[in-house]
Image: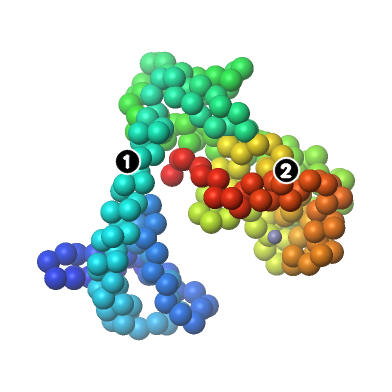
Amino acid sequence: MLRTVRAGKETITYELVQTARSSLELRALPDGLRLFAPKRYPLRQADAFVVQRADWIRQAQARLNAYRDREAERFPMTEGMEVPLEGERWTLRLEKAARRSARFEEGVILLSGPDISPDAVREQLRDALFERAKERIAQRLDHYMPLIGRRPGRVTIREQRTKWGSCSSQGNLNFNWKLIMAPPEALDYVVIHELCHLYEFNHSPKFWERVARYQPDYAVWRDFLRSGWVHPYN
Ligand SMILES: [Zn+2]
């Protein structure tokens, strides 16, 4: 639920997300401000909580903007830019064309389309990487499912802000599309990890033993993904 409040001269818009939880948590995310609150939390108190944190919100948003500017400089979405993909550095090539298309060939990502401005390229590149992630994750699941011997329910590829993958109690798996930018071994690690949760719904020693059967050096890739390895495309 989107809500707008006034804090002095400012208006602040935030999304109220009510879930089964007992405390409030305010997060400044690239796509907006979100307040996580318990179910049936009084709206007036939620608004007041946000208003009280107006200074913090301003600082958090300034940090996000600075981050975005730095990223725009590092990843200008122009011809020749380097794109991390499957653990390698690929080169971006742009071409004006009537129709949008994306090709991946020998270290080159060729994007064609009517609009090759940085904003359009950012979106097109993201779509192309997302599609590639979907294909690659499906392939790796097909590879590991018979070895591991369990089939998941639904498999969804999406953007997750803080997770590389997850497994629900119903056996549905989620994967973060940004895994496509990591080395293939790191992507495999997440696929194996989530499939192993279909046996052990925890991170017990037994769980890790099972993961190690399919990827003996899994700890390297687990640590790699935990190390704050940054993915540039928001
Ligand atoms: Zn896990």
Q: Kindly tell me whether residue 99 is visible in this rendering.
A: no
At a point 12% along the width and 66% down the height, the residue shown is 9
Which amino acid type corresponds to the residue marked 1 in the rendered image? Asp
Question: Which quarter of the rendered picture does the N terminus lie within?
Answer: bottom left
Q: Relative to 14, does residue 97 appear above or below in the rendering?
A: above
Q: Looking at the image, which is closer to me, 62 or 85?
A: 62
Residue 31: x percent and y percent? 37, 53
Question: Which quarter of the rendered picture does the C terminus lie within?
Answer: top left
At a point 71% along the width and 46% down the height, the residue shown is 220
Q: Relative to 109, does residue 59 appear above or below in the rendering?
A: below
At a point 14% along the width and 71% down the height, the residue shown is 8
**Mark 1 — residue?**
69
The image's colour scheme reads: rainbow
Q: Mark 2 or mark 1, which is nearer to you?
A: 1
Residue at the far left in the pictured view: 9
Label 2 – label 1 distance at C-alpha:
32 Å
Q: Looking at the image, which is closer to me, 217 or 213?
A: 217
**Mark 2 — residue?**
188
